[in-house]
Amino acid sequence: MNLPYFLRLVSLCLACFFVIYVGIMLATWSGLPLALRLAEGMSPRRATRFLFALRFFPTALALLLVAIVCAPSYLWLEPRDTAEHVGLAFVGLALLAAAAWCVSISRAVRALVASIRFTRHCERLGSVVQLAGVTAPVIVVEGEIPLLAMAEVFRRRIVITRGVLRALSAEQLEAALGHERAHGASRDNLKRLLLLLAPEVFPFSGRFAALDRAWSRFSEWAADDDAIEQDGRRSLPLAEALVRFAKMGTALQLSPLLTALVPADQDLSIRVARLLQAVPPQEKRGSRLFPLVCGSGVLCMAGLLAVAMLRPSTLYSVHSLLERLVR
């Protein structure tokens, strides 16, 4: 099959991304059990940052390598005025990468559109109010269904039903709204959108499912901690709000970009037990050092790549490997 210059460039970037991503992803999979154990010893906020970085690491590093190594070597050394024969394996890798990106982008777009539509629907049915101490507008919707959540990504809104307002006391409502404010301050919905954008080249493997569940669990714990600000006097009203909210029935999950007070897939008993502890658990020393060591390693790797890019011999070597991949 003969492809012109631009199509070869696009196909090359996709194929290189697929090969690099698979290699990094397999290495990440092998370290997942250790990473999850280390996260258990961290504070919830630190654990969410660590797990989010780990989940997005294969995509980010693969894109970086394609952008600063593969594409520049091709643009510098590949003749522009001729078509070139490419192998079927190369075309297959490019198509697999394109399919993975199409699936992830469409998944993120669907979630974003569903979130926007849901918020606008609530605005039409309910009324927008401004509660004391809450910076984000609050949409109050008539009804008894258990719904209290931070909606949307960029134009954040707190959505609550009239039944929840009646069920919670003033202290419980303040604590629950503080939990949702914490989700908004940490931009958890934006992080959920970015996780949906991260492609999965093996969509039916489910290998990252445990990592995604752990990140979701720790994000709820972190929002609880931020809501009470480690003040034991605030933890009891939040625990009572969680229990009373759960007794109202199963919470609706209308969009992946909706951070509910009590997600349906979370173990409520653990959250309540954490809130009722007199002293919050302390981080293990090794758990604090590990993310720092990993971050330093990534920065060193990026520095080495930048230095290598300044050497023409590196681009020649990379181009030679790319020629083998293309054919």
Image (cartoon, helix red, strand yellow):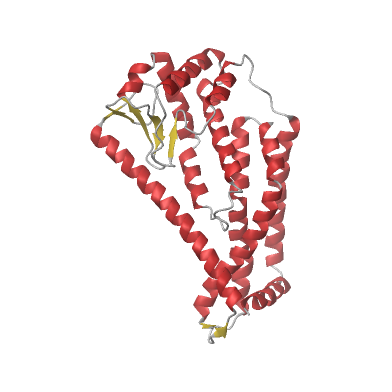
In the displayed structure, does residue 246 sit left or right of residue 281? Answer: left
* Residue ID at (75%, 34%): 286
Residue 225, x across and y down, in percent: 55, 24
Residue 3, x across and y down, in percent: 52, 81
* Residue ID at (54%, 72%): 11
Q: Is residue 307 visible?
A: yes
Q: Quadrant of residue 175?
A: top left
Question: Farthest residue toward the bottom?
Answer: 82
In the displayed structure, does residue 126 sit left or right of residue 86? Answer: left
Q: Is 94 placed above or below 100 here?
A: below
Looking at this view, is 178 or 96 the one in front? Answer: 96
Residue 136, x across and y down, in percent: 37, 31
Q: Quadrant of residue 176?
A: top left
In the displayed structure, does residue 174 sit left or right of residue 210? Answer: left
Q: Is residue 13 visible?
A: no
Please tell me how many numbered marks the rendered image carries: 0
Q: Quadrant of the N terminus?
A: bottom right
Looking at this view, is 138 or 216 the one in front? Answer: 216
Question: Farthest residue toward the right?
Answer: 286
Residue 269, x across and y down, in percent: 55, 22
Q: Quadrant of residue 178?
A: top left
Q: Is 65 placed above or below 282 here?
A: below
